[in-house]
Amino acid sequence: MRDPYSLFEELKRHYFMYINSRFALRHEALAAERQALLDADRKLYREPHIEIVPPYAYAEAGFGETVTRLGLPEELAAFAQYLRQITKD
């Protein structure tokens, strides 16, 4: 898995590639000036904000057991199990 900042940099690079190919300028000085004007926080993008939070405490009961304990429909536990199966990497 990529870290969030490198993903941000890659997306930003691809966005500028699109702008420079779709709206190409013949004069290199103008292209460089446009790049300098647009390549700043709050122009075309925002710098990532990463907040460090403490990990969540794990529940001792599984999701299915919690559904039963709370008296929720059993279909909810089955649906959660289905989602877990189709989203495995």
Image: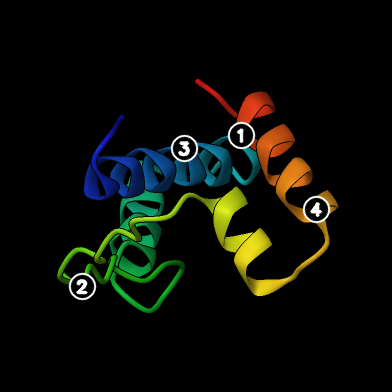
- Residue at the (64%, 25%) spot, across then down: 85
Q: Secondary structure at mark 3?
A: helix
Q: Which kind of residue does numbered mark 2 sit on?
A: Glu
- Could you give the CA–CA distance between mark 2 and mark 1, rounded to whole angstroms? 27 Å
Q: What residue is disc 2 on?
A: 51
Query: Which residue of the protein is positioned furthest toward the top in this rendering?
Result: 89
Whether the residues at callouts 1 and 4 have beta carbons within 8 Å, the answer is no
- Looking at the image, which is closer to me, 30 or 88? 88
Q: Is 75 drawn above or below residue 6 in the view shown?
A: below
- Residue at the (43%, 55%) spot, across then down: 61
- Residue at the (35%, 38%) spot, across then down: 10
Q: What residue is disc 3 on?
A: 14
Q: Is residue 57 left or right of residue 11?
A: left
- Residue at the (67%, 60%) spot, across then down: 68
- Could you give the CA–CA distance between mark 3 and mark 1, rounded to whole angstroms? 32 Å
Q: What residue is disc 1 on?
A: 84
Q: Is residue 65 left or right of residue 22?
A: left
Task: Name which of mark 1 and mark 4 comes first in the sequence.
Answer: 4
Between label 2 and label 4, give the one nearer the viewer.
Answer: 4
